Image: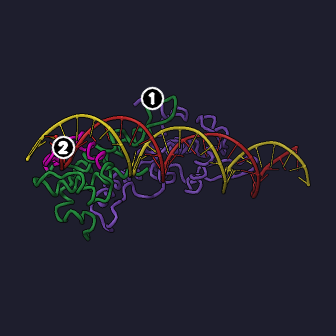
Chain colours: A green, B purple, C yellow, D red
Amino acid sequence: MKYTKATNYALHIMAFFVKQDGRDNLSLQPIANHMNISPTYLSKILTQLVKADLIQSAPGMNGGYSLRKHKNEVSFFDVIQAIEGSGALFTCEMNDQSDCSLERVMREAENHMITYLKEKKLIEVVAKNSMSSTCKEKV
Amino acid sequence: MKYTKATNYALHIMAFFVKQDGRDNLSLQPIANHMNISPTYLSKILTQLVKADLIQSAPGMNGGYSLRKHKNEVSFFDVIQAIEGSGALFTCEMNDQSDCSLERVMREAENHMITYLKEKKLIEVVAKNSMSSTCKEKV
DNA sequence: TATAATACAGACTGTAATTATCTATAATTA
DNA sequence: TAATTATAGATAATTACAGTCTGTATTATA
């Protein structure tokens, strides 16, 4: 069990948008170049973020993508849920059961993680860094 | 991202062992019958639990599997780690980075979940139920 | 010692999810 | 109308997961 690459990309992309807030629209190509992934694939991820209302898109000249929520309000959880969906990590697979005590514990555990991810905003992590070094800064 | 079925099975199996503690060895066939999965596949899962020192195995007549740790000490985390391994859920995939602030947050989030899963013992959940109803009891 | 009962290991297969690409289409601006 | 942009759909490649098959090793007991 691991987070998908798409979630990985999405977090980096959103960190970028939070950083860039207010400036011009960003279009697909430059983002793809910067992140070193194919434009069409990136486009799929961006579309998911649009559908989750985290960013907005505009076609045509001078179009592109821009942040929709206030930059202070985008949480890690928002981004993760946009990509991974909202299903629980653990669902009891046993045939005959409707109410599983193991499952209840597993959900509670997941909720501990989720609570933290909801509280934690991207801006907290992004503020100090330049875009390209989202992943470079020393502790 | 979801927990694997193997983890699902493993939790149910270990709940069974905790419940059964002290009684005779359990051999593959009866467990497989009870859980409705194929013996060879079950065997793989049990072997992983053996390697993680949660249960022990004995070949030959009157052989089988039995609990190794004290029944009060088996945590959800023990079982999950035995199957899923110990890698982090999130690993920064960007090329040029060694130290990623996003990753740090994601690990911290995961740790919140792990801490809970380490504290929570199987016996807490199993005590009230009969084996076959690990998943049946009403709240 | 022979046999039956058991666990273990490796190769293999099928299926589903993820990752990614390609092509075509729609919308907008100038 | 032409250029620039996003979106959608089909499809392919890769990987992880779930499961099976076959054979081997170990132990108890008759």
Check disc 1 and give the amino acid type.
Answer: Ser
What chain letter is assigned to the residue under label 2? Answer: A
Circle 2 SS class: strand
Disc 2 vs disc 1: Cβ atoms closer than 8 Å? no
Q: Which residues are magenta?
A: A42-70
Magenta-colored stretch includes residue A64: yes
Where residue A30 sits, quadrant-wise, is bottom left
Q: Secondary structure at mark 1?
A: loop
Q: Disc 2 marks which residue?
A: A57
Residue under the image location 17 percent in, 54 percent down: A18
> In the rendered view, does A57 fall on the left or right side of B82?
left
In-front residue for pair D28/B33: B33
Answer with the quarter of the image where residue B115 lies.
Answer: bottom left
Work out whether residue A137 can be spotted: yes
Q: Is residue B21 left or right of residue A128?
A: right
> Where is residue A82 shown, x and y percent of the image?
28, 43
Mark 2 vs 1, N-terminal side = 2
